[in-house]
Image: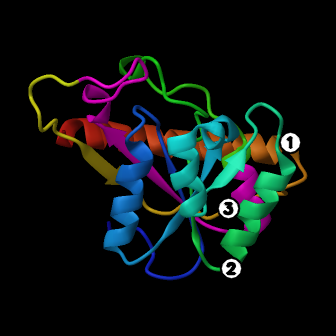
Amino acid sequence: RERIPREGPAILAANHVSALDGILLALAAAERGRPIRFLVAAEFFRRPFHGFFLRRFGQIAVRRGEQDQAALDEAVDTLRGGALVGIFPEGQVNPDPEAGLARGRTGVARLALAARAPVVPVGIWGSQGRWPRAGLHLRRPLRTPVALALGPPLEPSGDPGSREDLEAFRDRVMEAIGAQVGRARALA
């Protein structure tokens, strides 16, 4: 957890194996005394229960698949204000985490390059045993082992207006996340 900076902007970029992953990252950030704002699919804001809490805790609604510039601008402003932003570059809960990471989206690179904020790669493993993409599992063991592994921050490099630079930085982030997933899996 010491890789989560105590102050200043940073992006926590993690793989996504469970609906619980955002809560796990928020708890890790809270242990460092840092609130975090996540980019969350806009459709979750329309659900009464989810939407209430997402709005209450200031999360950022993003319209998936639309390169939602307003959401990205809000996240960049959040970073420039010195806060933490959480993102799952895979874009959704991975239906088969055993097969490896899903293809990453360039949103993480767009944020990092525009705000010049470091990216902390995070690997999460074990939460899919309780709440995989298919839904909540209430079975033994009741206390599923879960691990988070945080890698060293990646300093952004490249031009935010260059598609090649965005893709290259995204690939660096995804490779770093993959390495942390391996560490988290070994720990769990």
Mark sitting on residue 156: 3
Instruction: Answer with left or right where residue 126 lies relative to residue 158.
Output: left
Q: Amino acid at mark 2?
A: Gly
In magenta segment, residue 113: yes
Q: Earlier in the sequence, mark 1 or mark 2?
A: 2
The span picked out in magenta is 109-137
Instruction: Answer with left or right where residue 156 lies relative to residue 124.
Output: right
Q: Is residue 137 above or below residue 11?
A: above
Q: Can the viewer see residue 82?
A: yes
Residue under label 1, please give it.
163
Q: Nearer the viewer, mark 2 or mark 3?
A: 2
Residue under label 2, please give it.
81
Look at the numbered disc 3 and give the secondary structure of its residue. loop
Q: Amino acid at mark 3?
A: Pro
| Residue 160 drawn at (x, y percent) | 84, 56
Q: Residue at x 62, y 79 (%)?
A: 82
- The residues bearing labels 1 and 2 have C-alpha atoms spaced at a distance of 26 Å
Q: Is residue 98 above or below residue 169?
A: above
Q: Amino acid at mark 1?
A: Arg
Q: Quadrant of residue 102?
A: top right
Image quadrant occupied by the N terminus: bottom left
| Residue 32 drawn at (x, y percent) | 35, 75
Look at the numbered disc 2 and give the secondary structure of its residue. loop
- The residues bearing labels 1 and 3 have C-alpha atoms spaced at a distance of 14 Å
Q: Residue at x 61, y 57 (%)?
A: 55
Within-10-Å neighbours for mark 1: few <14, some 14–19, many 20+: few
Look at the numbered disc 1 and give the secondary structure of its residue. helix
